[in-house]
Amino acid sequence: MKTSVVRLAGIEVELFEAGSGTALLWLHGGNGFEPSHPFVQPFAVRRRLIVPSHPGFGRSGLPDWLDSPDDIAHLYLELMDQLGLARAEIVGCSVGGWIAAEMATKAPERFTKLVLVGPAGVKVGRSDKLDIPDIWAMPQEEVNKLLFHDPAKMQMDPAKLSDEQLTVMLRNRETLALLTWEPWMHNPKLKHRLHRVKAPALFIRGASDGLISQAYLEGYARLLPNARIATVAAAGHAPHLEQPQAFAAAVLSFLDG
Amino acid sequence: MKAWHFSENAYPYLPPAETYPSIRVSLPSRIYDPEKGAALYHRYIDEWLIAEDEGVEIMLNEHHQTATCVDPAAPLVLAILARLSKKARLLILGNPIANRRQPVRVAEEMAMIDVLSQGRLEAGFVRGVPYEILPANSNPVRMNERHWEALDLIVKSWTTHDGPFSWEGRFFHMRAVNIWPRPWQQPHPPIWISTTSPSGAARVGERGYVQATFLTGFDGTRAVFEGYRRGWMKAGRKEPVPIDRLAYAALVYAAPSEKQARAGAEKLLWYILSNKVPPHIANPPGYVPVQANLAILRGAEHPLSGFKKNATVDAAIASGLMFAGTPDQVMAQFKKVYDYVGGFGHLLIMGQAGFLEHEETVLGIRTFAREVYPRLKEAYPDKTPSWSPTEAVAAQ
């Protein structure tokens, strides 16, 4: 396990690496990444796990020109160049799934398999209804109900966190807003580009995910020629945090298969 | 000293507050009765014109999706007032340019009003309260940056008179800007900016625009004006900030008797009491800096929620948010704030709110205009130097 800082387009990006073997680029969701996250261990024993903190998340820098998941997709292709990764597996969660999808449309040949976990990024439904509920237009308790199968177990208590941890959390929130505000949680161009992504793709969501519906996931998956769908029971928007073992089993079986 | 009659175009006919979670953003418009609304528009316009007759200047503002201020397009009402009024200065405070998609359109609207009114426009710009974010679908992150770029583009639109110019900034892109009409006032109408933060005020002070602050009380107002003075001096100016660069908005109600004044003041409190807004609407991500949000998580008050605790007439007066009473009492309350903050040359009078009826509103305007305003003008000429109260204390 190691944490380092890489420079991408002049931005200092925090990078976590663990394990060895086939490279797996992991793109975190809106809540950011911590090395203590429970999915790390099951993946690190089977893969070379590479987890950057997106610009504006964790301790990564945020330049004033950067404001979209698409911008980050370009950075991470550069990251793959720097790491000497001609090809890799990629897992993206939520907004990280959006970034992964953008990357795959730009360089489809560089990804052997894709796993999109409750991914944002496209618009598949009607124009007078949000595909993904507006988490900024409801009280935090309501957001927690959409995020988690078991909100009581998963929600954080600020009193138990240090100032530094809370600062990271608040900055993550702010950057998430910056990246996804308008159009809300999607890039209208992305769905017209995804047909180029021919590698096997797994779209997976927690059965209780209140943000990414089954219909949305199915509509998204249909945009790729070689996608399948899976569900993790007793999990919400972050199945890798709520049911890490069942999640890892499903994803690794797809990646190994 | 200049005084300004400010009315928010409130729509007070609401169901009990416990029946809705927020008076802003999400309150269903089914509640709004257009017939009552029309009567209110006409009444509020009449009140502005009465204020003008009494020698008081005119001020209005803009909010969206709210019963507290049914003026989602302030330039429209200002255009009406530009035609109907004859002599008053016309202050819009202001244009929410971090939320307007097209700053050049704002420059055009303001230039039209300046020409229509033959040079009576005072053009104010505001970042906008956090409740404006959702109605505008405006990204709360980097609002300040957008605000300042938009202002630069507007000033350039007003002051370029030799054919089209282009603008390729961080947020706004225009290839051929050449507005008609150009403003009446040269080089452009006076610019006002409102802010509640000392760092924001420093930036306003550097440029020498008029700095306004709303209901910030003794210490908040002092901090904003100190910030302004820092910026003013940093820009290399030698003379102190004249008071006509500084404006303070308070709830104001003067009446001949204490009893009448108290009754009016109680009704004005609607402005504070009715502002029911849940935290997620009051504090979108990125609206305040991360460090301020950290303090809020650790128990600090949101900067905009602090004034709720002043929801009685006595508390509001004690905090410097309200000047209410007989003319003598209003003078004394005013002077206390004036002296504490280092002086200011514009009193923005929140003179109507909620169920304060027409006759009561007019009584407040007339009593102020006839019994208080002449004394303020005599005591505080526009070019009186302001001073730094903290430096004055240190010097003692």
Image (tube, coloured by chain):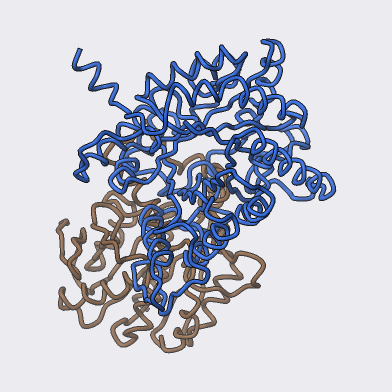
Up the image or down, B253 lies above or below A114; here it is: above
Chain identifier for the blue-coloured part of the image: B
Q: Measured from the top left, where is residue A206 in percent x and y?
A: 51, 60
Residue A6 located left or right of residue B18: left
Up the image or down, A213 lies above or below A104; here it is: above
Q: Nearer the viewer, residue A99 or B142?
A: B142
Q: Which of B351 and A233 is in front in this view?
A: B351
Q: Which of B342 and B368 is in front in this view?
A: B368
Q: Measured from the top left, where is residue A174 in percent x and y?
A: 39, 52
| Residue drawn 66% across the image and 52% down it | B77
Res. A208 in view = no
Res. B44 in view = yes
Q: Measured from the top left, where is residue A110 in percent x and y?
A: 28, 84
Chain identifier for the brown-coloured part of the image: A
Residue B45 located left or right of residue A172: right
| Residue drawn 15% across the image and 64% down it | A6
| Residue drawn 20% across the image and 42% down it | B234
Residue ranking furthest to the right:
B35
Residue B205 located left or right of residue B344: left
Quadrant into which the C terminus of chain B falls? top left
Residue A246 located left or right of residue B38: left
Q: Quadrant of residue B244?
A: top left
Q: Which of A125 and B276 is in front in this view?
A: B276
Q: Measured from the top left, where is residue A48 in percent x and y?
A: 22, 68
